[in-house]
Amino acid sequence: MAGLLNHVLHVEKAVSLSLPLKSGAAFYRTFPSATGKYSSSYVPLKTVASIQNRTRSLVQALRSAKNEQSWLIRLEEFNDHILRYQGVGRSQAIREEAISFLLSVRKKGNKEVRKEAQKALALLGWVDPVKGRGIKVLSIDGGGARGLMAIEILKRIEEMCNKEIHELFDFICGASTGAILAFLIGIKRVPLEECEHTYKKLSMDIFEQNSFIGKGKLFLNHAYYDTAKFEQILKNESGDERLIDSAKDSATPKVAAVSTVVNHSLLMPYVFSNYTHPYGSSSKFPQSCKYRLWEALRASTAAPGYFEEFKLGNNIHQDGGLLTNNPCAIAVHEARLLWPDEPFQCIVSLGTGKYKGRSGPSTEEFSSLKEKLLKVVASATDTEAIDTVLSDILPKSVYFRLNPNLSTNVPMDEGRIEMLEQVQFDARKHLEKIDETLKTCAKNLLQDKTVLNRGMDRFRNWYRTT
């Protein structure tokens, strides 16, 4: 024990002498048993010049690191700084040629160093080449409990391709329930069978409620269901992980969740992502990678009348489906910014089912206020208009819209197990009818890079770092 303590104190002294003040603080966060003079409190930088100077010193500290432990500590400090000052800090780091250095660190560091370097590259807008001949995009609609429909379709795609979904796609985007599924399969890499179990349990836990209690909540909080309970479930499932943390694994696809910001003069989509755009490009939509997974999901699923709206920073978020229940157009826009020189290889847009028959009469189980809210949400979440536009623009060999018909009207807040199983049955029945379309889609997804593609990848990477 004494030998171990002496070793820690020796490392502490060596690191603290060679690092700037903040990096010393990072050391004590890494080794909490070591106590010393550095404070964990942070004093914000208030001027552009101070941010630039701090960025410059952090890049220099990275270059002068002598071992992998020092690299790791300084990378963590660098990432904290860039995440806090994404505008000025990022541009200054790029001017200091940090990207080329981080690429070299990613090749030769140990596992933890490589992960932290990968996160740093993501913060600076570096994007690795796509998996196949072009960009492969997966978009998942909102629809509450009907998200089981999308799971059934994805099961069939996995079966045909003999690969997991996160291996097939470069970019995965979802709104509302689609955002939950996008995070499960894209970031958490949860098997689809487990996703199915999660959806059923979540639907039964959240959407089963005494109507008298629900009416009271709707009147007081504009939310029929228990928002606090739902929020706690999201926290328990996703933990304290931030969106950008998932970028540490280079095998994780780019993932985005869409919400609607409602406290500005006009409603606007908001994109929660695990990436930043390449330097010099900018999205048409406000975006952030700094929030936690549960915060992004809570914002994207805050359906009016169902759950309370959600405040993050200066923005108030409601369900992404209010504006973009079919987020495929946003997914295409974001993917184009990430890979501006690549063609689209395959775009798969998944719906959560459509019902063409008449809905049944209202029952006394619902208050008139809730009924009105549900009609507003249902009309706002129509997904076929986006499909019509994309079908006209994109080649049929590239764009696949899969949105099976429902045999009965299934509301978004369905919690009865027999109705959830009916959604799955309808999906499987529809998939049998479009088997040839699915085969074409799978064949498209599996097209590998050509020798020319690989050569172009190497050239672009060289050009971007010179």
Image (cartoon, helix red, strand yellow):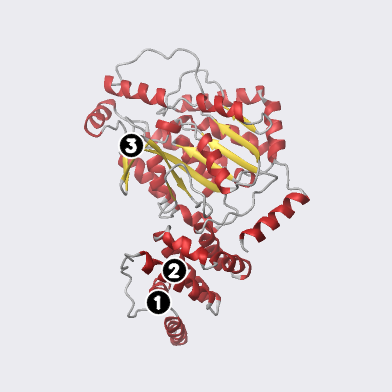
Residue 292 appears in view: yes
The crowding category of the residue bearing disc 3, from other C-alpha atoms within 10 Å (few below 14, some 14 to 19, many at least 20), is some
Q: Spatial distance from mark 3 to mark 2, Cα to Cα? A: 35 Å
Q: What residue sits 45% from the left and 12% below the top?
A: 358
| x and y, in percent, of residue 168 in the image | 64, 44
> Which element carries disc 2, helix, strand or loop?
helix
Taking 137 as reference, is 282 left or right?
left
First in sequence: mark 1 vs mark 3: 1
Q: Is residue 109 above or below residue 302?
A: below
Residue 190 appears in view: no
Number of marks drawn: 3
The mark closer to the camera, 2 or 1, is 2
- Residue underneath mark 2: 55
Taking 364 as reference, is 96 left or right?
right
Q: Is residue 53 above or below residue 368?
A: below
The mark closer to the camera, 3 or 2, is 2
- Residue underneath mark 3: 262
User: In the image as oriented, which residue stretches furthest toward the right?
Assistant: 451
Amino acid marked by disc 3: Val
First in sequence: mark 2 vs mark 1: 1
* Picture quarter with the N terminus: bottom left
| x and y, in percent, of residue 446 in the image | 71, 41
Q: Is residue 209 above or below residue 300?
A: above
First in sequence: mark 3 vs mark 2: 2
The circle on residue 24 is 1
Amino acid marked by disc 1: Gly
